Amino acid sequence: MGGTIRRCALVTGGAGFVGSHLCARLLDADMDVVCLDNLATGTRANVAELEQRPGFRFVRGDATDLAAWQALPGRFGLVLHFACPASPADYLRLPLETLEVGSTGTRLALERARADGARFVLASTSEVYGDPLEHPQREGYWGNVNPVGPRSVYDESKRFAEALVTAHRAVHGTDAAIVRIFNTYGPRMRTGDGRAVPTFITQALDGVPLTVAGDGGQTRSLCYVDDTVDGVLALAGSAETGPVNIGGADEISMLELARRIVALTGSASRVRFVDRPVDDPGRRRPDTRLARERLGWRPRVGWSEGLERTIDWLARPAAA
């Protein structure tokens, strides 16, 4: 992290999967951290150990609620806006809340960052590219998104949030950046959130069939959570505005991912094919040249090591 970040950071959605890892890393960097989370999809257990550490404070509140922002203590040098349901199971269950946190939540976070003179980073997503017609996806690609499809509540929430960040920077000079995060995995994923990695691992550990959508030929590029956090903080400590892609280089089909997980767990599970969701992207891999050249970032954790760590964590009774 660069020297431009002052000592106190705010992480919205800090009790979520990626957010909790960000909070831990910021504490490790001797920063005070305030975690704002309404626990709609995050969990207090994700930050339980952090609450025992000096400099950390958990605040239960909604990023769309002005009163929650007014009650936040102190003055921040860094605002990381990660509050948003991120898995299909969650944003399909909370469609209006997803749109609201991308609009009102982003606006309130930007206004706090501006008032405090803080560096602001928006957690956007590879979903802004939709089912891409360009491969790999560069930041300059405008995407192929269905604005009225079932995934649109998440896609359009993030696309609007990006537009809001861009406008706020242009009108107010807010020190704001956008990171587009591709598929991330690792410890603290929820077993029931519907994403492929925790679903396949849980099924393999339970000895039941792994449910692969469609023919399993659709691809994702997986990035271990520690690497994703490295990329986010590299952007936060830079002068870059983005958007910047952060994601893995290991493009893999869902069928091959299922087979890798079966092998790593030693499971006897077979694969069962199920219907593929509407608007499920066919291929996804980031062009990360900008992150490499401007931020000096690249993934370090290989798929085998990352999956083994994730399997170990999900195998624990407390992860159920």
Image (cartoon, helix red, strand yellow):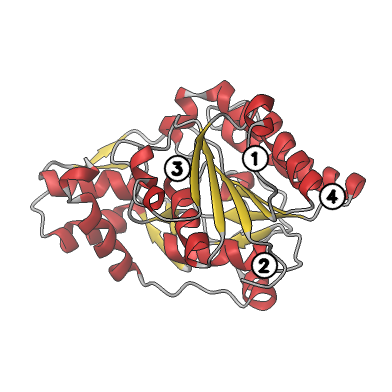
Identify the residue shown where x is 45% and y is 56%.
Answer: 54
Q: On the image, numbered disc 3 is attached to which residue?
A: 15
Q: What residue type is labelled 3?
A: Ala
Identify the residue shown where x is 28% and y is 41%.
Answer: 191
Foreground mark, 3 or 4, reads: 3
Crowd around label 2: few <14 · some 14–19 · many ≥20 (10 Å): some
Would residue 165 appear left or right of 11 to someone viewing this image?
right
Q: On the image, numbered disc 4 is attached to which residue?
A: 169
Coordinates of residue 209 in the picture (x, y in percent)? 16, 42
Q: On the image, numbered disc 1 is attached to which residue?
A: 158
Q: Distance between the residues labelled 2 and 1?
A: 22 Å
Foreground mark, 2 or 1, reads: 2
Q: Which of marks 2 and 3 is nearer the N terminus?
A: 3
Q: Distance between the residues labelled 3 and 1?
A: 20 Å
Identify the residue shown where x is 30% and y is 36%.
Answer: 192
Would residue 68 appear left or right of 250 to someone viewing this image?
right
Instruction: For the residues labelled 3 and 4, say whether their Cβ atoms are less than 8 Å apart.
Output: no
316 shown above or below 246: above
Q: Distance between the residues labelled 3 and 4?
A: 27 Å
Would residue 150 appear left or right of 176 to someone viewing this image?
left
Q: Which amino acid does label 4 sit on?
A: Arg
Confirm whether residue 271 shows in the render: no
Q: What residue type is labelled 1?
A: Lys
The numbered mark at residue 200 is none
Foreground mark, 2 or 4, reads: 2
Q: What is the secondary structure assignment of the residue under circle 2?
A: loop
The numbered mark at residue 237 is 2
Crowd around label 1: few <14 · some 14–19 · many ≥20 (10 Å): many
